[in-house]
Image (cartoon, helix red, strand yellow):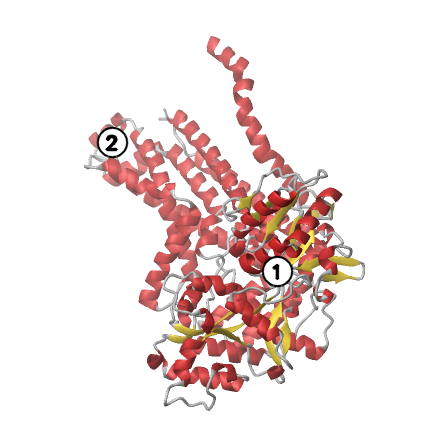
Amino acid sequence: MNTVGRRVGLALAAALMLSGLAACSNTGGGTTSTSTSAGGASSTASGGGYVYFLNFKPEVADKYAAIVKEYKAEKGVDVKVVTAASGTYQQQLTSEMAKSQPPTIFQINGPVGYATWKDYCADLTNSDLYKHLSDQSLAVSTSSGVWGVPYVVEGYGIIYNDAIMKKYFALPNKKVSITSAAQITSWDLLQQVVTDMTANKDALGITGVFSNTSLKPGEDWRWQTHLTDVPLFYEFSADKVDLTKGTPASIKFTYADNYKNLFDLYLNNSTTAKTLLGSKTVDDSMAEFALGQSAMIQNGNWAWNSVKDVQGNTVQPGDVHMLPLYMGIPGEEGYGIPIGTENYFSINAKADAASQKASLDFLTWLFSSDYGKKAVANDLGFIAPFDWFTGAGPADPLAQEVMAWMSKPNIKSVSWSAFQVMPNQDWKNNLGADLLSYAQGQMDWPKVVSTAVSDWSKQASAPASTK
Amino acid sequence: MRVSTYIKKWFPLFALPTTLAFVLAFVVPFGLGLYLSFTKFQTVNDATWVGLRNYTNAFTRDTDFVRALWFTVRFAVVSVITVNVIAFALASLLTRAIKGTNIFRAVFFLPNLIGGIVLGYVWLNIINGLLIRFFQKDITFSSAYGFWGLVIVVNWQMIGYMMIIYIAGIQNIPGDVLEAADIDGASPWNKLFNVTIPMVAGSITICVFLTMANCLKLFDQNLALTNGAPKNTTEGMALNIFRTFYNQQEQGIGQAKAVVFFVFVAAIAFIQLRATRSREVEG
């Protein structure tokens, strides 16, 4: 009896181990990647090639279905679009690239992404896409070719709700002399307004000036990537660091104290106690802003949909504007919000020539045909950096705000160049974890800074296996 | 006699589907993985040979892998003991003549039907809720929270399954043996240690093996509950390999770590099977 029992048990054990393995392989592809696919799986274009686009932006995943349908109707070519779930693009791309019909259009996030995928990036020097870039220096290129063409320009800053700001500036007991949020043009003014608003938060009907500083692991990119770009941008500019060669070997973090200024301002004037930030997500943060519990939030123009779609949203489109990330760095008043891109199209060099051409044809159509241009501006909401686009651009208020900052006279933009050369995701995640410890009061600031600096050197000096 | 010749004759045919599945889903990827651990690669069909460099880098580049290994070992030791002790205790309770044992068995087994990712997220909310309510802190404050959180989740998930195996084992104990012990005047503890436990040694082998293997391979629950927070200190080996692969983009090193991981798990499982099996008695 026991022997039989044991045999059954061992068979069960074997089955469980196998299912465990299956579960492991799933997490690479299936479970974490709720892929949206549109178009046929075995899509063939005229001339024997195929077009397969692995999309990075989950927020516009469903919009591509209509675009692909229209392209099929106009040109008779099937396009397959698959969208990787948020934060899983590298996993998805790695596994898709190993398949027999790999993506023909994929995206890299800048020089670091190019270094990883360089064997797969086709030269786009002669493509219409590159020729029609309004600023060709935006592309990812080396002396031997052009490997990634940006397709969307984005910007981020401190988004504020002017309805609440107007309420504040109407207060009889306000301590600042300025009369509107648009007049906040320096770190000092920002700090004065924010602290005074916190003192009057009951009168303003808010629980905090800033939405929570979401620091849950994986939800901390607004700080470890976006906010960190600013001090590093000024540092690289001041030191004249050449970023075209990719990640610098080391950083000094010269403006760490300025970074702390703004980060502390977020933490101390927040809707949420500092000790609870480790379980807050970006969505939580956006919801607080949408519901009018906070007056300001740091995020980019891609976030408009996540404000608009919150149930009970109180924020009017005409009330959202952006401020630069002032933190007290000398000369920062001459700069606006950080504007740039981390979205570059690359064409798979290992696909056959017909597929490469079909893929480029699709992208050219998307950004130059009448239907395509309308879809890009209105449905995808992209500020596309091509000369095919003239006129108003996307209608959403945050995109309008980014364009307004781009065209301000005598104001330069902070570039995204610094965060594009951060060594890898691990460096950012480690910084995020330390920022969380700092917020919790478990790590002091000098330690956060010194760890970020030493970790950069370590991660930037990749081991021999990756050289 | 005739039966065994039939088995011999038809064995290859009936074993074929499973063998094929095993080879395709296990042996081939395993071989490929072993090869890739000696290469530099971006995608699996595009690799260049680099020799043993990945293996030295796995240990020398940072101390995270060793830390993850140590975390996994501590976690496995604690969880294997708690899961098996609690499962066995429940099994002995639910094999007595109590009303509604079947309902209790079903209730304890149910958590096993939920996937690790879901359990991890559900428990994250429960644990954070309690920590925030009573300490104004959340699970990211200390690696101890994450460690014990994982122990709780894994216990909750696996106890029911192990309990079922123990119940089957206990029900298989012949009544006359227990009766004889009773007549000889054995105390309940004597009966437990000298009759019941030796008689269910087969179940113990299976349960310890299953819990050990699952704890060492821990991934879903780890990813969902802590994702390594605070700063990778609650990161098991599987999660460390995943992070090396995707967040550091060091596929070769990740693969080398995976091979080390396999050898480690296989060795421990083998030793454990040898050790517990030698204690089994035929009923």
- Amino acid type for the residue under numbered disc 2: Ala
A201 left or right of B271?
left
Element type where label 1 sits in the image: loop
The nearer-to-camera label among 2 and 1 is 1
- Residue at the spot of label 2: B181
Residue at 61% over, 43% down: A72
Determine the residue located farthest toward the top in the rendered image.
B2
Dot 1: chain letter: B
The front one of A332 and B160 is: A332
Residues marked 2 and 1 touching at CB (< 8 Å): no
Residue at mark 1: B62
Indicate whether A10 appears above or below A39.
above
Q: Is residue A392 left or right of residue B196?
A: right
SS class of the residue under badge 2? Answer: helix
Q: Is residue A295 visible?
A: yes
> Residue A128, located in which quarter of the rendered image?
bottom right
Work out whether A427 lies above or below A170. above
The residue shown at (48%, 69%) is A436
Q: As displayed, is residue B13 above or below residue A65?
A: above
- Chain of residue at mark 2: B
Can you tell which quarter of the image residue A185 is in? Answer: bottom right
| Callout 2 crowding tier (Cα within 10 Å): few <14, some 14–19, many ≥20 | some
- The quarter in which the C terminus of chain A is drawn is bottom right
Q: Earlier in the sequence, mark 2 or mark 1?
A: 1
Rendered location of residue A124, percent (x, y): 75, 55
**Which disc is residue B229 wearing?**
none
Measured as percent of width and height from the top left, residue B187 is found at 23, 38
10 Å crowding of disc 1: few (<14), some (14-19), many (20+): few
**Marks 2 and 1, how far apart in space?**
58 Å
